[in-house]
Amino acid sequence: MKFFNKVAAAAAGFCLFISSIALADTVKVTDVTGREVEVNVPVEHVILGEGRQIYFVGALDKDEPFKRVVGWRDDLAKADPETYAAYLAKYPDIAKLPTFGGMKDGTFDIEQAVALKPDVMLMNIDAKTATEQAGYIEKLEKVGIPLVYVDFREKPMENTEPSMRLIGKLFGKEEKAEEFIKFRADSIAKVTDTLAKANPKKPLVFMERAGGYSDDCCMSFGNENFGRMVEFAGGVNMAKDIIPGTFGTVNPEQVIASNPDQIIITGGNWEGYVPGGAWVGVGYGADEKEAQRKLEGLTERPAFTGVKAVKGGNVHAVWHQFYNNPYQFVAIQQMAKWLHPDLFGDLDPEATFKELHERFLPLPYKSGYFVSLNASR
């Protein structure tokens, strides 16, 4: 009888092995650059070319957000320390995950990546030039590691949905990805549909990127990223015709001459980069009173001298990391409330973000992502 039990167990194991092979499927996927890449899906071992890709990866594997991650770039702990700390508290083993430097700064260790034997590497499109110049794609291909590009940063309003679908396909979580995409689209439509019907006058908005991060002024956005989000929210992006690409700089005189109706500054806790800086520390569970104090301090810079936005108290701060993840729709809703308070009095971006956490994300929601000098908004 024992012999037959062993035979049965072996047969069952063999069937399970055959089943696992059948579940793996080599497919061609198209990344956001248009490259066709062959990948065995669903992937089980992934290197995140940027740590902040966990913002979406965690939505696909809500119960075990790091179960496929065999290595990741070391940016999350510095760029978003509160979120990293929350993940670390809940999943302490992430402290042992191998970390990488960046492609663009030349600190990426390809030998370490190869040793981890990933099924795929997810790389942000902004690292494309550095990746190609170093010949990393060819080097990885030689050892059977495919690299695919995603984008939540350079052209997020164009590439976010394709990036989510791509990662969903790689993870075998297409249905969950589509559920997230629909929630995102519906949340944006709550703003754009109302604006299309009401056709209100659009205020001129100066969108400052990372205000207070350095002494220089003023980094901003062209017709993408937060600059495009301003347009979705019913405003006119002041730097749209000044900055030709996604990111750039306007001088203080241009801000004063344009005299914007509203100013929105992106902020975050950048103590790891600029200790004690003037940046506005909004983010996961942030101290909103302290963030508001620092926001008020930024209005005293020469670039904002006498502009309408400052005189009217229409100066606001929004979490910088909305610029690099698929949660942009929450920022669009909040900016719409700032720009058109009468139209969007019933819209609740906090409730939208809370629902996103409850339905998709591994972490509980904590407020702190927005502050304003206008108490009524």
Image: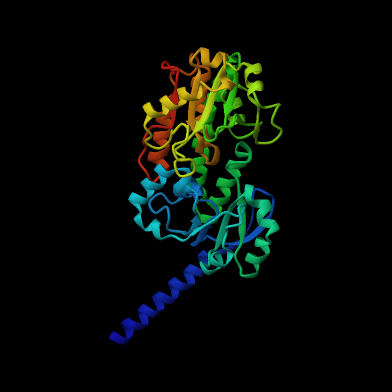
Residue 185 appears in the rendering: yes
Q: How many marks?
A: 0
- Find residue 101 and report its horizontal and vertical position in percent: 54, 56
- Find residue 140 and report its horizontal and vertical position in percent: 62, 65
The residue drawn where x is 71% and y is 33% is: 244
Residue 353 placement, left or right of 254: left
The residue drawn where x is 60% and y is 39% is: 156
For this orientation, the residue located farthest to the left is 1
Q: Is residue 94 above or below residue 184?
A: below
Q: Is residue 191 above or below residue 158?
A: above
In the image, 175 versus 59, the foreground residue is 59
Q: Quadrant of the N terminus?
A: bottom left
Q: How is the image coloured?
A: rainbow
Residue 372 placement, left or right of 131: left
- Find residue 139 and report its horizontal and vertical position in percent: 65, 66
Q: Is residue 331 above or below residue 142?
A: above
Residue 187 appears in the rendering: no
In the image, 323 versus 46, the foreground residue is 323
- Find residue 136 and report its horizontal and vertical position in percent: 65, 61
The residue drawn where x is 42% and y is 44% is: 81
